[in-house]
Amino acid sequence: MRHVAWRRVATLFCAVALCGLQLLHVAAAAPSQTASTAAPDCVEALLRRLGWSINSASISAPIIQRGAPCTRASLAQARAAGDLQITLPAGWDAQQRGVALTALLDDSATQCAYGFDIGAATRRAVTQLQDNPHYRFSALQLGWIGFGWRGAAAQGWSGFKSFGRGYQPRGSNAQALDAFYRGQVRSECGVGRQVAQLATQRELYGDAGFDQVFTPGELSIGTFLTLHDTDSILLGAHAGEFFADGKAVKTAQLGRQAFVGAPGFIAHVFDKAYLDDIHNQAENFVVVDVSDAAAQALARHGGFAHYDTINRQIWELSRQLHGPGKRRFERLLYERDAALRATLDPQQQARLQELQTLLDDPFYQGFLVYVHPKGTKPIGYHVARLLDRNPRTPYAIDLTLHNLRTTLYWRWIDWQLQQCGASTVTEQSIENSATPAYARRGTLH
């Protein structure tokens, strides 16, 4: 009975983001000193790396053609559409060019271009996580996060909170994440989301950069409440400025790439008294990909609120299709099990068709999320699955507060500029050391 009670507590905290995260203090943040003082050549190189085409012409003021990169499937598609172009006056000196290009780092189009890198990193990260058969959901274990018989230390983590409620890397940050890529670990879905977010940063920076840029405290994992009292880059003292868009109104207007990598949750609407399976009261996710059709549907309907209404309709229709089987709706609506569908009477067949029509909306089919331990699936799968787990309540969908395109964006920009600056200094040092001292005295002929 004790381990059952523990799991009930674990799943309760799996959804603590539903309220607690919305009350977090939002710290002010701005482009860093690194970006403001970076060499113009480094800023230009970074913008070009992100996809900007930078040209010069006989004009008196810059001409910026941002286009709509957040709506594109790839950077190549954005370039083909003529997005991300800036033309500077040919007569400008290096300082004038530098000021204009530095300002472009704080442009929404540049953040959309960065979204292509975030998307690729997210997909690499969740592929690693879901391909590890030994990274499982919470079960009978000694703490909140279970590191198996090898223990946390052997897999690169150091505990700092009792009952396994908080860990941070004890050595290499990248090697610590390997525990979730290749080791034996158990956790609930909230930690699964944290790990996916941190693994995205690892994939974005590469192992060496990930070890260099982040402190162990910034990569803390555990209960959401625990992270608030740490230096966590996700939810703690170093998280900086949060972007609040619970129903995705702003994100939907930006486009598909603005969603990718963002964290969110699917939560029960009715009171907990209506829950039959406490372990599935909520699911924490990270957005992995959004199809063009799904993005257009979200933009047309203004975000998630419309789909909360559709979720309610789906739930109401499902009440007319109850029957035996633990995965009845998952089989009927996601797997489209022909044998099971054939057992329905004509009236139920009609209700099923109504349900299927609702779930065939591009949002339910093309909005892909990673949920531990289910891997990456369309959000429609989770809507169908939760009809089985908690048939007495509908579910709602939200993005949680995040700093993917605020604090974490500027951390990555700073690192890129610092790498460029260090490389430039090294090259200059090599050039100077390769020039004989007497060459500067004019004695070579």
Image: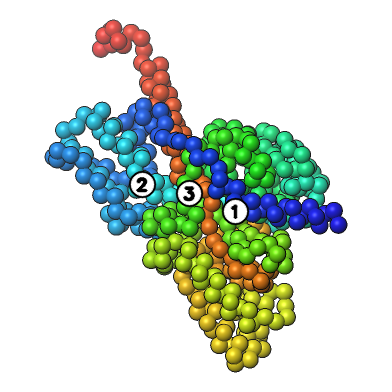
Calculate the distance from the C-alpha at mark 1 to the C-alpha at mark 2. 28 Å
Which residue is painted at 59% across and 53% down in the image? 18
Q: In this view, does 429 lie above or below 164?
A: above
Calculate the distance from the C-alpha at mark 3 to the C-alpha at mark 1. 13 Å
Q: Can residue 430 be seen in this view?
A: yes
Could you say whether the residue bearing mark 2 is in a helix, strand or loop? helix
Quarter assignment of residue 279: bottom right
**Hey, what amino acid is under mark 3?**
Ala
Q: Can residue 408 be seen in this view?
A: no
Chain-order first, disc 1 or disc 2: 1
- Given residues 77 and 97, the one toward you in this image is 97
Q: In this view, does 426 lie above or below 50?
A: above
- Given residues 255 and 270, the one toward you in this image is 270
Could you say whether the residue bearing mark 1 is in a helix, strand or loop? helix
Residue 165, x across and y down, in percent: 72, 43
Answer with left or right where residue 226 lies relative to residue 378: right
Mark 1 touches mark 2? (CB < 8 Å): no
Which residue is painted at 60% across and 47% down in the image? 20
Label 2, residues with CA under 10 Å away: few <14, some 14-19, many ≥20: some
Which mark is drawn over residue 18?
Answer: 1
| Residue at numbered disc 2 | 108
Which residue is painted at 70% across and 54% down in the image? 12
Quadrant (top left/top right/bottom left/bottom right) for the C terminus: top left
